[in-house]
Amino acid sequence: MTRTPKRAPDFQLPSAPDKQLSLAALRGRPVILAFYPADWSPVCGDQLALYNEVLPEFEKYGAQLVGISVDGPWCHAAYRDSRKLRFPLLADFEPKGEVARRYGVYDRQSGTTQRALFVLDKDGDIRWHYVSDPRVNPGADGILAALEQLNPKGAAHEPA
Amino acid sequence: MSRRDDRAQLTPSVGSRDHASGPKDAPLTLVEYGDFQCPHCGKAYPIVKDVQRALGSELRFVFRNFPLTKIHPEAEHAAEAAEAAGAQGAFWQMHDRLFERQFALDDDHLLEYATELGLDADRIRGDLEAGTYAARVREDFISGVKSGVNGTPTFFINGVRYDGSWDRDSLLAALQTLVP
């Protein structure tokens, strides 16, 4: 990944069976995009469970976390409910993996997104990204370091 | 900053705020980030004991809390109870008891264990109600996140995250290769 900030491709995806979320709607605050291969698989579970716990730290930086996989919105709804996830899961379902492709993190072989993290600044530029081994939970330290770099006074962040 | 370090480092390093078992100047320090309600940590518990026995005074073992409270609803109070027991000088006794009785970690049982261990259970009840040790548990958790903990248990050997298998033989071998 280049050091130069790069525009994050815009998208609009279902965040629930009857709701859509667009990246543009999140402008004005840092955004964490967490692409993960699939709902229900054990490693993803750990990764999203970890992010669910770390959420208050992300929020100190005013950041919004969204998870993205190719699972459909009904599957996401059941998964979110089962794991008590408090952040949206977007369905990159139709056309399948289209958004992941635009971010260069679609795995054609498995037909899923790669396990990839993007941190966007409040203007929608990609400031950090990391592609992990699909079997390995990448943790949250890289995300926190990136948010810290965006806003060194992160803990003192006050929503405008 | 496009990649993070492949070998995550423990931050902060082991210090006086930590619960440590074994000599301060031991050549090996094993740190576990764990969750008392996590079945994998329960499985790791006797393995760590075994490794401690095998290495004797060569090893210092440190436990830090990493409760995943949304999936393990009893993990937070269990962690706070261990800290509360620690304030009464019995962190390790409570740590051991919680892993040995992982199947029963509701508040009533936590207080029962405190009584069994000869601790002031009323004080621990008060500590749990007031959340006296909640901030300390959260501090452990955040230090883990920043150190690259990605699930439980996560081990650090002499400050570097250990990504290998933690079955007895692998963990022991990983530690032994570092003994001078």
Image (tube, coloured by chain):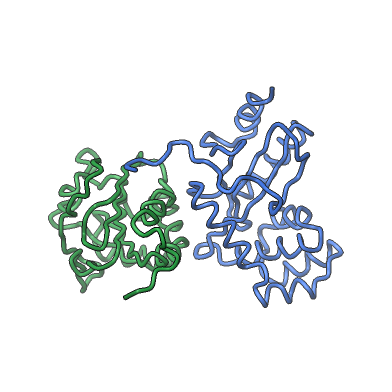
Chain colours: A green, B blue
Give the residue at x 55% y 53%. B143
Give the residue at x 19% y 57%. A93
Classify the position of the N terminus of chain B by image quarter: top left
Q: Is A5 on the left or on the right of B130, as rendered?
A: left
- Relative image position of residue A118 (x, y in whole percent): 29, 51
Give the residue at x 63% y 24%. B177
* Number of numbered markers: 0
Classify the position of the C terminus of chain B by image quarter: top right
Q: Nearer the viewer, residue B82 or B15?
A: B15
Q: Quadrant of residue B54?
A: top right
Q: Nearer the viewer, residue A110 or B75?
A: B75
- Relative image position of residue B96 (x, y in whole percent): 74, 52
Q: Is A134 on the left or on the right of A109, as rendered?
A: right
- Relative image position of residue A33 (x, y in whole percent): 29, 56
Whether residue A81 is visible to the viewer of this picture, yes or no, is no
Residue at the far right in the pictured view: B118
Residue at the far left in the pictured view: A95
Q: In the rendered view, tell whether residue B13 sits above or below residue B138.
A: above
Q: In the rendered view, tell whether residue A42 sits above or below residue A10.
A: above
- Relative image position of residue A144 (x, y in whole percent): 41, 54
Q: In the rendered view, tell whether residue B32 sits above or below residue B160.
A: below
Q: Quadrant of residue B82?
A: bottom right
Q: Quadrant of residue A84?
A: bottom left
Whether residue A148 is visible to the viewer of this picture, yes or no, is yes
Q: Is A77 on the left or on the right of B61, as rendered?
A: left
